[in-house]
Image (cartoon, grey):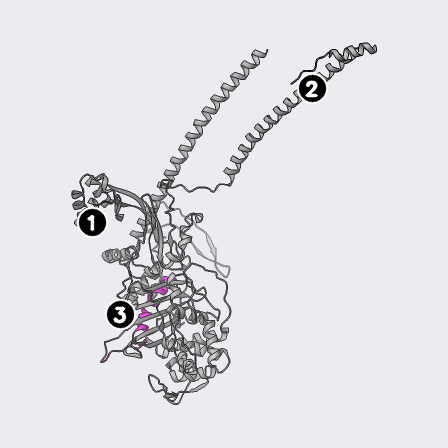
Amino acid sequence: MRVFVYLCLGAMVMFLAFWAYRENYETQEALRQVETLQGEIGELRTSIRVQEAEWAYLNRPNRLRELTELNFERLELMPLAPQHFGSLEQVAYPELPELGEITETIELRGELPNDEGSIQSTLSTGGQP
Amino acid sequence: MSRVPLRPLARILSARQKGEDHKAIENENIHQRMLAARGRQRQMAEGRLLIASICFAVAFSAVGVKMFALSSTEPREPRTASSASKIYAQRANIVDRNGRILATNLSTYSLYAQPHLMTDPENSAVELATIFPDLGVEDLLEDFTGKRKFLWIKKKISPEQKQRVHDIGDPGLLFGPREMRLYPNGKLAAHVLGGAGFGREDVHSAEVIGNAGVERTFDAFLRDPAQENAPLELAIDLSVQDTAERVLYGGMKLMNAKAASSVLMDVKTGEIISLVSLPDFDPNTRPNPKATLDAADNPLFNRAVQGVYELGSTFKLFTIAQALELGLMNKNTMIPTRGPLVWGKFKIRDFHDYGAKLSVTDVLVKSSNIGTAKIAIDIGVKRQKEFLDSLGLLTATPLEISEAAGGRPQLPPNWSELSAMTISYGHGIANSPVHLAAAYSSILNGGYKVEPTILKNPNPERGERVVSEQVSATMRDLLRQVVVRGTASFGEVAGYEVGGKTGTADKPNPQGGYYEDKVIATFASVFPASNPRYVLIVTLDEPSENSGAKPRRTAGWTAVPVAAEMIRRIAPLVGLRPVIEPGPGFGIVQAKGSSQ
């Protein structure tokens, strides 16, 4: 009995030692991974900053102004001035979409009451709208 | 340990003689032995228990300590730099009020040499000199062949330069990572941003520290890792700043001025939307301050903040506002303006003769020095001083640009009645344009004091009252009249109801007295006058408008047209629609979905 208990204990110690050994290496592996990931995040952040800086540099007002001047014929961009605020009346209505030829017409007869309530006209649809 | 025999002969013999049972002695001894053995066992068991509990306590406290450590550690920011470096190189961005980048950091490399590792110093020196034309071959060679074991060659190099140095292939030329401060907009807002340089440095990294402007004021904030790179938001608007710089530069050239500055301030919050000082510089390559140059000619000198000038007639607004606030007069009270006004040896004159008397309104509209001086006499020295102090004109501004502390107003050493009279029309006291902007904002925004700030702060606490609502409205009306029919008639911008006051002050001669033909022309304006949103101060240094028969130097001919053009260009950018006087059948209707 006693021998059996010792054997069991020995086996448990060996198992635990093995488990601790593995855990240790897994932890180290995880730590290494974290470090790699952090390095990667850091690098990505740096490159984001570089791109932001580049974006800001490419969009600097001086350059944009030069570009609008170079492309004035095509873009016709002017510095914003008070007269560029318009009134609603100056906005043109959009053109009505062209309707195609209406071919399959249906003959329809009916009567519409006018304001006085008497029946005045007969409508028929079809042909040009 | 001496062992007690179970049947000690002496005792047994004596017991036998007395006829007692000798077994009792033996039993007693056995009993005592058992007790002793039990005591020992107990002690051992207790010892084991103690050891076991200590083991458990150590194990659990180790777990506990680790858990505590895990829960109480600050999260660490991922970084590329090696953790061995003790210098924290990160520095937060600076952005404008719409989040556009004004200053950022860029990773780059520094170049250093370790001459004892070099294989071919002569060739390396020659090659380096071709890559960096500012380095001399002799100097490099001297350094490389000398006793030094380490030397910096360049603190910042571009990737192309790095590749070319790499191609030299000398093992003694080494690179270290560097954070570099970059101002992508070049000269834009240079005086606000200031600049940055390197502090402590070693091979692996270097400290970037601000050495002027907001970079210096907020150095600790920008470098604080706890802020997690939260950007510093300024009140500056990039587009407005650019437009202001461009228009002001054009105006400065057109008016033959040697320098110029402008401040655009939100009247309600005191936020500085744009601050220009010309000539300017590029903060990416901040020039070294030259000792030989006069401070005022140095491009690093921030005229809007550091430059204190006598701002001339723009000060009349304060005198008249105070007189109305104190109830000494109303805007129609007539003031005698027959000149010259003689006070001791001193004579006060007007630019033109305005006749026997003018109303208070016309004193401001026509800019009469005599009239203003008479009003100042009524106010008195003490009250004038208190009022100017309440507007913040007697102390340096609390603006968060590191140079602002240097813009201390110059006050008369002895504030006599004569000083009060000259100060009433802006002579004998010197202030920076930012002072003027803050004081104008305080009077015109409804009468609440504003503190100038460069930080975005749309809802500041309301300051104390300096003038009443009515006086504020009256002053806005008077300023509008100066533009409509007074000295600033070139300041009219259709649709924006510009109001403002001109100021032309002779420049003081360092040898004493004043120059005859050098002036500082200032235009302090507010728009729209009926519902003020912004105050714009434009100052030109030594302007002269030469289109006429003789040069014209007054602000009305120089600073005012420049300011008008600035307002015309800036107002639409800040979203102000022109207000058109309602005519028959004419109006502006806001289209749906097109606000701004």
Chain identifier of the residue bearing label 1 in the image: B
Element type at mark 2:
helix
Kind of element beneath mark 3: loop
Locate residue B32, reporting x and y percent. 73, 17
B48 vs B289: above or below: above
Which residue is tagged 1? Answer: B132
Tell which of B202 and B99 is nearer to you. B202
Distance between the Cα atoms at labels 1 and 3? Answer: 35 Å
Pointer 2 or 1: first along the chain: 2
Q: Chain of mark 2?
A: B
Mark 3 or mark 2, which is nearer the start of the sequence? 2
Give the residue furthest to the right.
B19
> Does residue B560 belong to the magenta stretch?
yes
Q: Are marks 2 and 1 in contact (CB under 8 Å)?
A: no
Q: Position of residue A56 (x, y in %)?
A: 32, 52
Q: Quadrant of residue B241?
A: bottom left
Residue B156: tell me if it is visible: yes
- Residue extent of the magenta highlight: B547-576
* Residue, disc 3: B258
**Which residue lies at the image location 31% right of the left edge and 72% below the top edge?**
B559
Q: Residue at x 34, y 78 (%)?
A: B487
Marker count (numbered): 3
Q: Which residue type does callout 1 highlight?
A: Phe
Q: Chain of mark 3?
A: B
- Above or below — where is B560 with respect to B462? below
Q: Which residue is mark 2?
A: B36
Q: Is residue A99 visible?
A: no
Q: Residue at x 48, y 23 (%)?
A: A19
Query: Between residues B99 and B78, which one lies in front from this camera angle?
Result: B78
Q: Residues within 10 Å of mark 2 (few under 14, many from 20)?
A: few
Q: Amino acid at mark 2?
A: Ala
